[in-house]
Amino acid sequence: MKQSSTLFLKLAVIIMGIPVLALCLFLLPNIVKVAFGEAADGATLGYMVLGILTLMYISAVPYYVALFQAFKLLNYIDKNIAFSDLSVSALKKIRNCAITISCLYLAALPFVFFIAQWDDAPGLVLIGLVVVGASMVIAVFAAVLKKLLQEAIRIKTENDLTV
């Protein structure tokens, strides 16, 4: 496979990481300041916002682990070792990270629902459901790819032993 196609995908993986990093460094700290001010006034809404923001920060860790594993997988493709246990392991880690992100946002949905009712903004719950759904789709896709890759490795090993 040409390295230009994997180079494009590597660039896409890096570009996917930049907005989340900017969100964690610039936007979320400002929201935390406002939420701390509300929590100091005794508003339960401030505590709920802090809880959701904490889950957002925690979910950034498996997100970057998954991006790193995707980057490693592209490197394996460049080195022509895509059909190896290393690739299977990377896909398994991507699946686990996607499940973790989905579970974190699923745990945050009751808080989001409360905030959406308070602010009369039902779209917030929909956004939370989209994140949960998207990460579950990624988890299922990674699991299917992992099974296909394991089967391809098994067939390749049988063919290598036959010849």
Image (cartoon, rainbow, N blue to C red):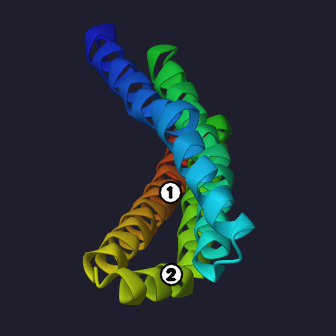
Count residues near mark 2 (Cα–Cα under 10 Å), then give few for <14, some for 14-19, many for 20+: many
Q: Is residue 41 visible?
A: yes
Q: How many marks?
A: 2
Location of the N terminus by quadrant is top left
| Earlier residue among tags 2 and 1 | 2
Instruction: In the rendered view, tell whether residue 34 sits above or below residue 129.
Output: above
Q: Can you give x and y, in whole percent of width and height, for residue 153 in the image?
A: 54, 46
Type of amino acid under label 2: Leu
Specify the farthest residue to the front: 41
Q: CA distance from mark 2 to mark 1?
A: 37 Å
61 relative to 138 in the view: left or right: right
Residue 119 placement: quadrant: bottom left
Instruction: In the rendered view, tell whether residue 91 sits above or below residue 133.
Output: above
Count residues near mark 1 (Cα–Cα under 10 Å), then give few for <14, some for 14-19, many for 20+: few
Q: Can you give x and y, in whole percent of width and height, for residue 161 in the image?
A: 61, 39
Type of amino acid under label 1: Glu
6 relative to 159 in the view: left or right: left
Residue matched to label 1:
151
Labels 2, 1: front one: 2
Q: Residue 130, labelled with which disc?
A: none
Residue 98 placement: quadrant: bottom right
Q: Residue at x 62, y 75 (%)?
A: 48
Q: Residue at x 44, y 55 (%)?
A: 145
Q: Nearer the viewer, residue 152 or 10?
A: 10
Residue matched to label 2:
109
Q: Nearer the viewer, residue 135 or 26?
A: 26
Q: Nearer the viewer, residue 118 or 17?
A: 118
Instruction: In the rendered view, tell whether residue 155 sits above or below residue 72.
Output: below
Residue 37 placement: quadrant: bottom right
